[in-house]
């Protein structure tokens, strides 16, 4: 009897040890697989631009013929805007604000406005080109201010107000006048 009981205990220990090893190894495998979907694949600038073109074509609801004309022109437009914006970003390292003279401040303002004017001129040039293939409503959508990620940057309505404006689903909105803010 004693021998039989000892064998049962050894069998139970062995069974428990094997089960624990199986559980831990499966847990490790599942943890490794769970990480794969969380990793975002890195897109090249060309892929990102292609996605932007496709998104705009869907947004404008273009037919195949118009989409064929639109895609190369829109790509050209995006590249022209990108060139303007890189010029804007290539400003010289600023001195401390207190160390600048009035003349330097005025010069920097004029340079910044000239660069912004170039962006506006580029948009006007492409507006004339897009008018040939798009209607007024499509042009309005195309040239609307970009809104991506703006709703995530919304802050409190006023410095006195600590509430962030929210949508019904809890997502922050851009500023909306309300009970906390008269603006």
Image (cartoon, rainbow, N blue to C red):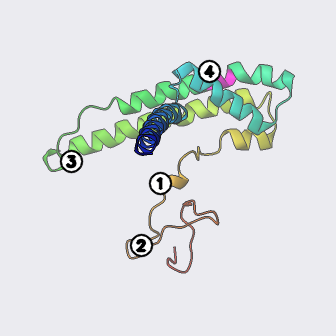
Q: Which residue shows up at 56% across the image and 33% down it?
A: 121
Front in this rendered view, residue 52 or 99:
52
Question: What residue sits right under mark 3 in the picture?
Answer: 102
**Where on the picture, by quarter, is residue 52?**
top right
Query: What's the CA distance linking mark 2 and mark 4?
Result: 43 Å
Question: What residue sits right under mark 4 in the picture?
Answer: 76
Which tag, 2 or 4, sits closer to the chain's start? 4
**Where on the picture, by quarter, is residue 131?**
top right
Q: Residues within 10 Å of mark 1 (few under 14, many from 20)?
A: few
Tell me the magenta residue range.
73-77
Whether 130 is drawn above or below 72: the answer is: below
The quarter of the image holding the N terminus is: top left
Question: What residue sits right under mark 1 in the picture?
Answer: 153
Tell whether label 1 touches label 4 (CB within 8 Å): no
Question: What residue sits right under mark 2 in the picture?
Answer: 162
**How far from the left and from the top, in percent, is residue 36?**
52, 30
Query: What's the CA distance linking mark 3 and mark 1?
Result: 33 Å
Horizontal side, residue 110 vs residue 35: left or right? left
Closest to the camera, between mark 2 and mark 4, is 2
Which tag, 3 or 1, sits closer to the chain's start? 3
51 magenta-colored = no
Q: Which residue shows up at 62% across the image and 21% down it?
A: 76
Whether 34 is drawn above or below 158: the answer is: above
Query: What's the CA distance linking mark 3 and mark 2?
Result: 37 Å
Label 1 secondary element: helix
**How far from the left and from the top, in percent, is residue 81?**
53, 29
Closest to the camera, between mark 4 and mark 3, is 4
Closest to the camera, between mark 3 and mark 2, is 2
Q: Which residue shows up at 69% across the image and 22% down it?
A: 73
């Amino acid at each position: 009897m004693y021998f039989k009981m000892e064998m049962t205990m050894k069998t139970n220990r062995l069974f428990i040890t094997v089960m624990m090893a199986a559980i831990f190894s499966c847990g490790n495998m599942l943890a490794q697989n769970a990480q794969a979907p969380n990793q975002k694949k890195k897109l090249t600038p060309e892929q990102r631009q292609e996605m932007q073109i496709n998104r705009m074509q869907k947004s404008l609801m273009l037919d195949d013929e118009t989409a064929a004309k639109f895609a190369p022109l829109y790509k050209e437009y995006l590249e022209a805007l990108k060139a303007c914006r890189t010029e804007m970003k290539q400003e010289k390292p600023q001195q401390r604000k207190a160390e600048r003279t009035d003349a330097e401040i005025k010069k920097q303002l004029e340079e910044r406005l000239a660069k912004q004017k170039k962006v506006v001129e580029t948009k006007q040039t492409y507006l004339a080109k897009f008018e040939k293939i798009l209607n007024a409503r499509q042009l309005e959508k195309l040239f609307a201010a970009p809104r991506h990620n703006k709703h995530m940057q919304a802050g409190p309505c006023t410095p006195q107000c600590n509430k962030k404006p929210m949508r019904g689903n809890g997502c922050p909105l851009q500023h909306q006048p309300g009970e906390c803010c008269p603006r």
